[in-house]
Structures are given as C-alpha cells and as structure tokens.
Image: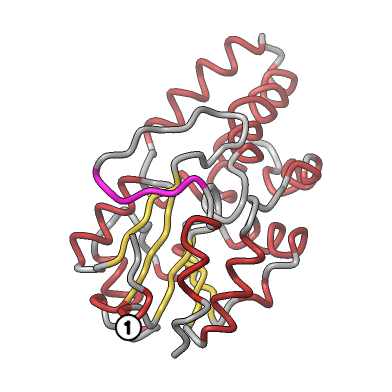
Amino acid sequence: MVIWSGVDVVFLDMDGTLLDLHFDNYFWQGYVPQRYARDKNISDEEAQAELALRYKDVEGRLEWYCLDHWSRELGLDIALLKEEVDHLIAVHPHVTDFLAALRASGRRIALVTNAHQKALALKLDRTQLGGCFDAVYCAHDIGLPKENPQFWERLQQREPFDPQRTLFVDDSLAVLRSARQYGIRWLLAVVRPDSCGPVRKVTDFPAINDFSEIISGLAGNKL
C-alpha cells in the first residue's frame, strides 16, 4: 500500500484517523441533541431531527467543523460541552507506535485537520500527542476545509511539499478525493474510524484497519 522509499512527508488527519471518532459521533448525535432538547424544552427526538437537518445544511463546509458557529446557532457553549465528555477522547490502537516509527525514520510528520482550534487544543491536551508532529495545520487557520481542493494549494504555501512523495491518511473519502485531485500520490483510508461503528467497505483507495498494517516497512526505510 505504501512504498516507504517514495515517501518523504506524512500528513495525518486527526478525528477518525488518529483518534477514535466515537467521541465526535456521540457528541454531535447524542450529547448535543440531548442538551439542546433540555435547553429548548423539546423532546430528544425533535432535537435530533432538527439538528440532523442543520448539520446537513453545512456538511463539508468550514462551518460544520466550527465550534463557534454551533455555539451561536444553538445557543450552547459547544466547547464547554466537549469538555464535559472529554473522557471519551481516545487514541486508536497502534497510533503511538506508528508515530514513533515515523519519527525514527526521519520523515516529516504533519497533522492536517478540519477540527476547530478549540477542539484541536482540547484533544491534543487530553491525548498528549501534540509533541509527535513537526507541524500542525488547522483548516480554520487556512480558511478552507480539506474537502476543497484549493485547501491543498494554501497548505503548500505554508508547508512546501512534493505531492508525489507525500503520504496522506484520512477517514473521509471526500477529503481523500480532494487530495487525489491535487495530486498527492500516496493515499490511505481508515475503514473503521469509530471503534463502535462498522468496518466500512472502501474501494476508491487503499485502506487500513489500523496503523499496524503499514508500520513494518518503516524500520528499514530511514531517510
């Protein structure tokens, strides 16, 4: 799936790739509707139906990932609500071993995420993964979500990279398609972003269950 001798730079998504997406799925589909229902004095079912429509309206846009946007829209302190359930934030199996192997190989490692700055800070603090990256890039700082092919042009200005010698791993197929359109050669999908969810069938891209599947080739391929 990856010929490591052809990779100098590794871009990694956060939610669903390095971190278990169960936290975010539970938060947006369960916890926020529950708190919204209580605030608006409506049923949980009514809240879930209303929020599902609101989510869909901005799906794939920067607003979807913006905690400040949802705080304004819903009248809730979304960042504070995330802290209330932050015990669910978890790192996927074999991630820390993979990051250590990448570091030992000499390759540049960048976290490239759509997560809002407040969510990013919370998760890096809780997981202690922040020191594992040479750089961290947030779509909200760049001004476009990763689903937009122009995102990669803007990233290139901040983090010059050779697309033909770059590996990018993400759980979002829409994001991977955007990266492929830009010309990133090495692309991997994560088939089980949520540990409580099903294994997805992915046919558009090479795919992994976890990072143990690609870690073995790193040992003999140092830069």
**Which kind of residue does numbered mark 1 sit on?**
Phe
Q: Quadrant of residue 96?
A: bottom right
SS assignment at label 1: loop
What predominant SS class does the magenta segment belong to?
loop
Q: Residues within 10 Å of mark 1 (few under 14, many from 20)?
A: some
User: Residue at horizontal 38%, vertical 75%?
Assistant: 4
Residue in the image at 52% along x and 83% along y: 105
Q: Nearer the viewer, residue 105 or 146?
A: 105
Is 96 left, or right, of 112 in this rendering?
right
Is 162 covered by the magenta stretch?
Answer: no
Residue 3: percent from the left, percent from the top?
Answer: 33, 71
The magenta region covers: 204-209
In this view, the residue in front, 80 or 152, is 152
Q: Position of residue 153 (x, y in %)?
A: 26, 74
Q: Which residue is mark 1?
A: 161
Residue 61 position (above or below residue 25)? below
**Residue positioned most to the bottom:** 223
Residue 159 versus residue 184 in the image, above or below: below
